[in-house]
Amino acid sequence: MRYISTRGNVSEIGFIDAVMMGLANDGGLLIPEKIPQIPAERLEALSHMSYQELAFEIISYYVDGEIPEQELKELIEKSYGTFRHPEVTPVQKVKDNMYVLELFHGPTFAFKDVALQFLGNLYSYIAKKTGETINILGATSGDTGASAIEGVRGKEGIRICILHPHGKVSKVQELQMTTVDDESVLNLAIEGTFDDGQRIIKELFADLDFKNKYHLRAINSINFARILAQTVYYFYAYFQVTKETGAKTVNFSVPTGNFGDIFAGYLAKRMGLPVGKLIVATNENNILERFIQDGVYQPGEFHSTFSPSMDIQVASNFERYLYYLLDENSKEVSALMDTFKSQGKIEVSEELLRQVKEDFAAYGVLGEECLQTIKKYHAETSYLLDPHTSCGVAAYEHCNDPGEVCVTLATAHPAKFNESIERCEIQQTYPEQISDLFDKPQYQEVVEATNDDVARKLESHFAKEKAI
Ligand SMILES: *Cc1c(COP(=O)(O)O)cnc(C)c1O
């Protein structure tokens, strides 16, 4: 399996090099040169596996022998051994034909752990194997930061710096990131939005001298390894739900920000999983909903919402989808991304828009509807949705036809977003791991949202003696 860039100017590389490169050196995103196809008989065999066994099978298609079998198995066992649920990502029935896939049983109570526990161990494996220095740089809308720090803290030879938008993450998200007392961890609270943070790191990664000098590695979902780890639970959920309902296809409703998680679902479908509709659920930051409705991809005004991890205008992974939409034509992708840079929007033809609508349904959820949905499900089913999952459920209600079976991805535990839960006049008790955070001191530095300010902080953090 070789990896190429959506913009066509990176010579083919293997899995480990793709993980290390993160953002493609030509500014594009790395993708497998061919999507592996899993035949129906093989799917039947996979349907009887545990989460870990299934992860090994799916991930092996993409690692393609670069990590010896036994070591890859151990890496997967270790990554999912930190989850509090024996099934790792259990499926819960909420009502007939409606399920949620609970992705929040990892260390930081959000779905990002599924990929970042794996990526943390993968980086540690690579550091040991090659002696490479690994300095991780990431931007977060709240959950990735905590999850990435949890994925790498205490691992030999790895340092990490996370940018988060100052005052724009939930209290628990902030505490999870900033209460980690570890020399190798630097939290930068930037005076700006997530999009500013994402743009800064994208530009620092694109400065190849800077990237190479400081051995910068990515943990955002621009890293293909994250997408890969996330495809596994689409398979897992599909198998559980089809066994229970006898359905042949399953719809998925996915709370979406950076288009990472939904792209993982798209990939699973392209691999041969009989996925029905892929429903893109957004909040008021609805660039993706608008694109799917009218074929124009154009950032709008930024809104702070009840679902802050989806407060994103420019969705990094969208370019991966664009590549497939444009029939794998990297010249056209480059041209469109250039247009996006110069004119701030992308518009696709009627014909392509028809394809987009075949690939996705979409619904943008407004704040009040998000809260109403939490209240309604709590009252009717006593299931407490977090505000991101609530957007997913509201989109399911809007886009799912009667008779179709749908799984909504439950991307976070409600305890992470108590600000919104309180507005619904619902009392919840925090899991102990979360209530303990409130007594701990915080470590973070506030900086201006400019490349220079961030670069200076990085230089001093990453120039320290090699982490122990
Ligand atoms: C990151 C996140 C999302 C959005 O996921 P993307 O991969 O960026 O689309 C949704 N919900 C929660 C809770 C998140 O942390």
Image (spheres, helix red, strand yellow):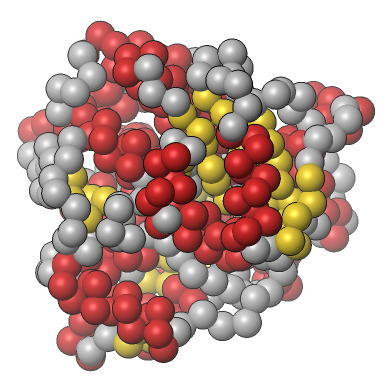
User: Do we see residue 285 in this rendering?
Assistant: yes
Residue 340 to residue 56: above or below:
below
Look at 43% across and 31% down and name the residue there: 119
Could you tell me residue 59's position as x and y percent?
A: 26, 30
Residue 247 left/right relative to 447: left
Q: Position of residue 348 (x, y in %)?
A: 27, 85
Count numbered badges in the picture: 0
The quarter in which the N terminus is drawn is top left
User: Please, is residue 121 above or below residue 103 in the view?
Assistant: above
Residue 227, visible in the rendered structure: no
* 51 or 20: nearer the viewer: 20
Q: x, y (%) of residue 170?
A: 77, 51
Q: Residue at x 75, y 55 (%)?
A: 447
Residue closer to the observer: 387 or 25: 25
Where 283 falls versus 121 (above or below)?
A: below
Q: Residue 168's spot in the image, x, y percent?
A: 75, 59
Judged left or right of residue 212, residue 62 is left
Residue 457 occupies which quadrant of the picture? top right
- The quarter of the picture where residue 217 lies is top left
Left or right: 149 with respect to 122?
right
Please determine whether, in this image, residue 434 is positioned above or below residue 382. above
Quarter of the rendering occupied by the C terminus? top right
Q: Residue at x 44, y 36 (%)?
A: 215
- Residue pictured at 38% horizontal, 17% vertical: 131
